[in-house]
Amino acid sequence: MPLKLEIVTPERLAFSDEVDAVVLPGIEGELGVLPHHAPLVSMLGLGELRIRKGSTTESFAIVGGFLQVRPDKVVVMAETADMASEIDLEKAREAQREAERALETGYHEGADLAAARAALQQALLRVRVAERRYREGRRHGG
Amino acid sequence: MPSQREIRRRIGAVRNIKQITRAMQFVAASKLKRAQDATLAARPYSDKIDEVLADLAAVLSGEDHPLLARREGGKRCIVLITTDRGLAGPLNTNTIRFAARVITEHPGDLAVITVGRKGRDAMRRARVPIEAHFPGFGDRPTFADVLPLARLVTDDYVGGVYDQVDIIYSHFVSTLVQRPTLAPLLPVTPAEDTAVGIPGRQFLFEPNAASVLEQLLPRYVATRLYQAVLEAKASEESSRMVAMKNATENAEELIEDLTLVYNKVRQANITREMIEIATGARAI
């Protein structure tokens, strides 16, 4: 039985297709979902979501949100979801540098500091996901 | 009868107005398309949040989170969503009139939070206390734009400043119909747990139902507000498009009428001149 996966963000439906398996960044560690999984609602952390379908894989950089699993369907409600192939590596690196600079130079406290740290974490995640995709692409291509 | 030159000037003026209204009509049409797409694109997330909340509600009771707790009476807050710019037909008037009726029908301790300049101006004139004001969220409202507003109302609700929060916005029914609507926001009322197939009780919650709820409710409130903002945006553009289309048509009609008058005056002038020449010739 195939597993239907939907990734939604407040602004759009980011992904909708049938897949064989999906690995998600759960709040308590990585979480793999195959068809016939028990009904589950979980919080999501920040991390990489990997999809396997046949021999192809796809990955997303996911930030926060929720996951609802039903035996035949998985719905990811993330704050943001960027497909690895759509991430601009240069831009992501630039965002990382900017976030680092902001943390080093700015005077931060409380919520402000948390926001700056979150920005850096997200930038790092995007870079990581995009770099991996780039390396894998080269391996397959070469 | 006005002079020929005067009429020609008026025709020119009306023609200029027509060009502007026609341009505005086309701009509004393309923005409407974008706003409609955004509204549709946001729907899956909002539907899903509703569903998960319904699942949670089957497991938890109303007292498990302050945003779910019902409090009788007390102070009411209305989030009034209008547009920043005018020339949008009867849209703002309708929304504001609807809000005024809601306010007068339920007198009591009340404050408004306005989104969009038109609503703020009207509330200020009516001397309704304005708690906060947000300028409209531009042509492409993003989810992040709405978060400060969502945080403000949830914090104030939890802090006991308000005991009830409602949104008034213009619901986009179709290009021709936009309906002013009141949507209760807080306390959050979960939908019935009709969850297609699986009842909420069978779900496993990780780390646990209470923490999921804690995270989910603020998202839910923000999503509701975001939806209302998107609906209002689509209403604004469609209402403006129709208003500008009417204005363009009226201008065309006016140009036709004026051209007719112009020709009549011109003909009368020619006739008069000919009579003058003829009588002049006879006199010699």
Image (cartoon, coloured by chain):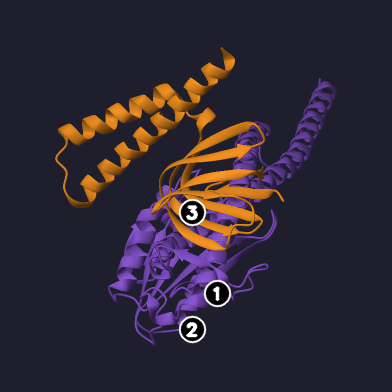
Chain colours: A orange, B purple
Q: Residue at x 45, y 50 (%)?
A: B143
The answer to whether B256 is drawn above or below residue B176 in the figure is: above
Residue furthest to the bottom in view is B72
Quadrant location of the N terminus of chain B? top right
- Per the model, the C-alpha gap separating discs 2 and 1 is 41 Å
Q: Which residue is mark 2?
A: B105
Q: Residues within 10 Å of mark 3 (few under 14, many from 20)?
A: many
Subunit of label 3: B
Residue B61's disc is none
The disc, 1 or 3, on the residue closer to the chain's N-terminal end is 3
Q: Amino acid at mark 2?
A: Glu
The answer to whether B150 is drawn above or below residue B280 in the figure is: below
To the question of a shared chain for discs 1 and 3, the answer is: yes
Left/right of residue A43 with respect to residue A139 in the rendered view: left
To the question of a shared chain for discs 2 and 1, the answer is: yes
Subunit of label 1: B
Q: Amino acid at mark 1?
A: Arg
Quadrant location of the C terminus of chain B? top right
